[in-house]
Amino acid sequence: MLRVAVPNKGSLSEAASAMLAEAGYRQRRDSRELVMVDPDNDIEFFFLRPRDIAVYVGQGTLDVGITGRDLLLDAEVEAEELLQLGFAVSTFRFAGPVGDFTSIDQLEGKRLATSYDGLLRGYLAERGIDAKVVRLDGAVESSVRLGVADAIADVVETGTTLKAAGMEIFGEPILDSESVLIGRPGEQNPAIEVLIRRLQGVLVARRYVLMDYDIRKELVEQAAGLTPGLESPTVSPLRDSDWVAVRSMVPKKETNRVMDELYDLGARAILVSSIHACRI
């Protein structure tokens, strides 16, 4: 039975469970459940603190897990990304009091507060910056005002909390993070491959729609240039031999633009359908 770690709370939890449900896996109905078995798919889910997931996977206690890239790197364990999942997108950045810092070179000898000390130490060491890292479990943005640190390194989504604390971002991003599926390096497990294919199917289904339209035969090549699909569009004959029906996958965000261009080209009966599941 495949053993999978899922975040039990926070920004990763709801989105991770929703994606697994879309992939056809049973998910818990009660947030107090810590373990749930899905016998139909021969899989067992363990709902854990997002920060602990990389540790369990890295030690081989669990086979795979969903966590953030920042948490994976901060854990410094033998685990690697298997698939980017595209939600809980954030950036790990430096911030300090407004006007105090403009470059990371100014951090030499300073105190830096963070909840990601492993990740930050590695970043500073790579750049030869000698600074004191102060580990905090939360409310990092308050550390400067309280005199614990001179600047901070933290995950930033909107930056609203930093502004409210009188802070501003400086320097280049330390890390661009998002949710990822992680596993141990070199692990060969058919069940993991099935899980990855299912999650990839969800990602594709979320990003694409199916577009159907009718068009005159002599315009098919031009239309195919607008809707090339993944390999090529499906073209089917119609009762009127001068016309054909075309079906193709189109990026969801480009739907209306493509429909307008097809219509201008001469396509008619343009229909768009959602994709609920797929295998690519």
Image (spheres, rainbow, N blue to C red):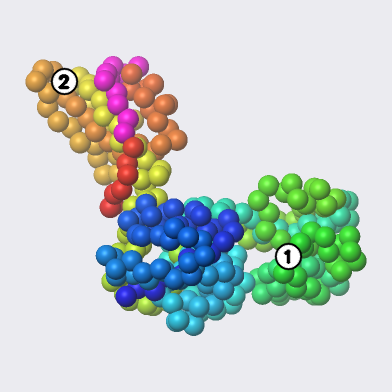
Identity, as a three-letter code, of the amino acid under mark 1: Gly
Q: Secondary structure at mark 1?
A: loop
Above or below, comparing residue 87 to residue 238 in the picture: below
For residue 235, which quarter of the picture? top left
Q: How many marks?
A: 2
Q: Position of residue 240 (x, y in %)?
A: 10, 17
Q: Which residue is mark 1?
A: 138
* Main secondary structure of the magenta stretch: strand
Amino acid carrying label 2: it is Trp
Q: Is residue 191 above or below residue 87?
A: below
**In the drawing, what numbered circle is on residue 147?**
none
Task: Name the residue at 59% across, 77% down.
Answer: 76
Q: Locate residue 69, reporting x and y percent.
A: 55, 64
Residue drawn at point x = 52 percent, y = 65 percent: 32
* Residue 147 drawn at (x, y percent): 90, 66
Q: Nearer the viewer, residue 146 or 17?
A: 17
Mark positioned earlier in the residue sequence (2 or 1): 1
Q: Which mark is residue 243?
A: 2
Direction from residue 247 to residue 109 in the image, left or right? right
Give the class, few, some or many, for how many residues have Cα within 10 Å of label 2's Cα (few <14, many ≥20).
some
Q: Name which quarter of the figure residue 274 lies in.
A: top left
Horizontal arrangement in the rendering, residue 136 relative to residue 68 (left or right) = right
| Residue drawn at the location 83% of the way across and 64% of the way down | 143
Q: Residues within 10 Å of mark 1 (few under 14, many from 20)?
A: few
The label nearer to you, 2 versus 1, is 1
- 254, 43: nearer the viewer: 43
Looking at the image, can residue 122 be seen?
no
Q: Is residue 103 above or below residue 186?
A: above
Highlighted magenta segment, given as a residue range: 264-273
